[in-house]
Image (cartoon, rainbow, N blue to C red):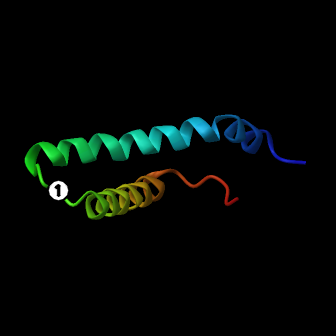
Amino acid sequence: MPKIEQMELEAHRTQLETDVRDLVDKYLAISEWDIPDINEPLANRLIITAIRQALDRVEKALPKFLEV
């Protein structure tokens, strides 16, 4: 049986994905202000890479109580 935390996350998974897409769109829009003729596919890949790196740093900063 799934743990309660997993069940709760499943209930919010769609919203989490929407939030991440909105975050990519936000930073793409900011980039477009500075670079009107931006290469959107490249910019999206760079933004997603930056988000992954930020997630890695956040994960490392979290306290480790129990390994899952």
Q: Nearer the viewer, residue 53 or 13?
A: 13
At mark 1, the secondary structure is loop
Quarter of the image holding residue 27?
A: top left
Residue sitting at 18 percent across and 48 percent down?
Answer: 31
> Is 29 situated above or below 63?
above
Q: Which residue is mark 1?
A: 38
Q: How many marks?
A: 1
The vertical placement of 12 against 68, above or below, is above
Q: Is residue 27 left or right of residue 55?
A: left
Horizontal and vertical percent position of residue 44: 32, 57
- At label 1, the amino acid type is Ile
Q: Position of residue 25 (x, y in %)?
A: 33, 43
Drawn side of residue 40 relative to residue 63, left or right: left
Viewer-nearest residue: 12 or 38: 38
Q: Quadrant of the C terminus?
A: bottom right
At a point 40% along the width and 39% down the height, the residue shown is 22
In the picture, measured across the screen, residue 37 lies left or right of residue 16, that is: left
Residue extending furthest toward the right: 1
Residue under the image location 36 percent in, 63 percent down:
49
Question: Horizontal and vertical percent for residue 21?
Answer: 44, 44
Please, is residue 17 above or below residue 38 in the view? above
Left or right placement of residue 65 versus residue 53 in this view: right
Q: Residues within 10 Å of mark 1 (few under 14, many from 20)?
A: few
Which residue is depicted at the point 57% across and 55% down? Answer: 64
